[in-house]
Image (tube, grey):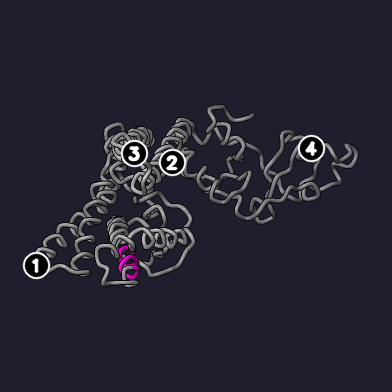
């Protein structure tokens, strides 16, 4: 359960909003709820045979107790992020717990750490408060559920503070390295490796040790394996993301952009062939970039027809979304825009001037450790 960089909101059942951000139950949460009911109800029935089929209602209440604890955790992330001026995209509870997606691009390491710590802090506070409340209660189902709520919150607080991504403790590690090195991506790599180490320790403690004690592959061990798989996948994804973005950090926008001259739709192909033999950005009469003229297109026009043929006839028109505004020479914002718009090529405009085009294929080559194709 963690606060994560912005990404598209997941699907699922909309159950409310926090500060305008949708709160959803992912469809996989209902699978988790069903598993918990089937797993918990028989144990409750053994302890309280007088409940009969009501034990399944208690099992459902257990699933809801877990959901409330998860949502309290995620609401804390969201509210602190919003307090720092970050836009929260979505809050989702699902089979894997929960996550809060927010745009933290303008937050520094200290504030990112505060957002991450807010979740475990909320769970710890709830766990402590409900532990005290149960001291004044007699036994029975209400006492059982309140005590369970206290324990679940304390468990979530402790587990999420383990120092490795994708957990909140991993984001604290990432922020600490980021603050020390001034390089966020290096922090992500370190926290990703820490996440893998945490996963190995989880497997050793909750899987290998119980099996060595002769407990076999019971439900507890299988559930631990499921959690370990989730942790390993998240840590590996963070590690890859940090390495990839670290490569991109070493590349300037100027290295990725291919500078091209500008021609108008009403210019002749002959003019384009003379002044832009390697291709050109084509603008409309109003000066808006509308597409490209490519060498292959010029070659298809007979030499004796080029002066009479307009560039518009061989224009490779592009969608309106292909214009990306840039500030400075930082490649990352432009590359993120290119990825979000899911287009193979974009024209980059900086300070009102068209500086060239950037191609997704070049970005992929750089992220793979190569150089742009020129």
Q: Which of marks 2 and 4 is in front?
A: 2
Q: Name the residue under label 1.
A: 136
Give the residues in magenta.
56-63
Give whichever of 302, 221 is nearer the camera: 221
Estimate how packed mark 3 is, as few (under 14), some (14 to 19) or many (20 or more) residues with alpha carbons within 10 Å.
Answer: many
Which label was assigned to residue 198?
none
Q: In this view, does 276 lie above or below 8?
A: above
Tag 3, which secondary structure? helix
Estimate how packed mark 2 is, as few (under 14), some (14 to 19) or many (20 or more) residues with alpha carbons within 10 Å.
Answer: some
Among numbered discs 3 and 2, the one appearing first in the sequence: 3
- Disc 3 and disc 1: Cα gap in Å? 36 Å
Among numbered discs 1 and 2, the one appearing first in the sequence: 1
Q: Residue at x 25, y 53 (%)?
A: 118
Q: In which quarter of the image is residue 122?
A: bottom left
Q: Nearer the viewer, mark 1 or mark 2?
A: 1
Is residue 89 visible in this depiction of the protein?
Answer: no
Q: Name the residue under label 3.
A: 207
- Disc 3 and disc 2: Cα gap in Å? 18 Å
Q: Residue at x 28, y 72 (%)?
A: 51
Q: Which residue is drawn at 44% across and 32% down?
A: 243
Which label was assigned to residue 296?
4
Q: Name the residue under label 2.
A: 233
Among numbered discs 4 and 1, the one appearing first in the sequence: 1
- Image coordinates of residue 60 in percent, x first then y, are 34, 67
Tag 4, which secondary structure? helix
- Image coordinates of residue 4 in percent, x first then y, are 38, 49
Q: Which of marks 4 and 3 is in front?
A: 3
- Disc 4 and disc 1: Cα gap in Å? 82 Å
Tag 2, which secondary structure? helix
Give whichever of 205, 118 is nearer the camera: 205
């Amino acid at each position: 359960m963690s606060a994560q960089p912005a990404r598209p909101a997941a699907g699922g059942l909309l159950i409310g909003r926090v500060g305008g951000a949708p709160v959803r139950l992912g469809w996989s949460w209902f699978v988790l709820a069903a598993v918990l009911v089937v797993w918990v109800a028989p144990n409750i029935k053994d302890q309280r045979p007088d409940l009969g089929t009501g034990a399944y209602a208690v099992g459902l209440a257990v699933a809801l107790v877990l959901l409330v604890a998860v949502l309290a955790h995620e609401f804390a992330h969201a509210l602190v992020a919003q307090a720092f001026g970050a836009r929260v995209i979505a809050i989702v509870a699902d089979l894997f717990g929960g996550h809060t997606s927010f745009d933290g691009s303008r937050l520094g390491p200290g504030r990112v750490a505060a957002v991450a710590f807010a979740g475990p802090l909320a769970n710890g506070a709830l766990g402590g408060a409900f532990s005290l409340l149960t001291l004044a209660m007699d036994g029975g189902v209400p006492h059982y559920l309140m005590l369970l709520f206290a324990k679940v919150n304390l468990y979530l607080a402790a587990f999420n503070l383990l120092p490795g991504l994708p957990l909140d403790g991993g984001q604290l590690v990432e922020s600490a390295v980021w603050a020390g090195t001034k390089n966020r991506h290096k922090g992500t790599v370190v926290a990703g490796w820490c996440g893998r180490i945490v996963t190995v320790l989880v497997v050793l403690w909750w899987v290998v040790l119980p099996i060595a004690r002769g407990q076999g592959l019971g439900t507890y061990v299988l559930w631990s394996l499921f959690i370990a798989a989730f942790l390993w996948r998240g840590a590996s994804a963070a590690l890859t993301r940090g390495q990839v973005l670290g490569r991109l950090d070493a590349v300037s926008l100027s290295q990725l952009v291919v500078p091209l001259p500008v021609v108008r739709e009403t210019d002749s192909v002959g003019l384009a062939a003379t002044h832009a033999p390697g291709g050109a950005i084509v603008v409309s009469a109003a000066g808006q970039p509308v597409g490209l003229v490519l060498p292959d297109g010029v070659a298809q026009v007979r030499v004796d027809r080029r002066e009479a043929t307009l560039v518009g006839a061989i224009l490779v028109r592009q969608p309106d979304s292909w214009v990306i505004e840039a500030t400075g020479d930082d490649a990352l914002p432009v590359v993120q825009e290119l990825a979000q718009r899911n287009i193979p090529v974009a024209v980059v405009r900086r300070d009102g001037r068209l500086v060239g085009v950037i191609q997704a294929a070049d970005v992929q080559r750089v992220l793979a450790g190569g150089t742009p194709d020129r």
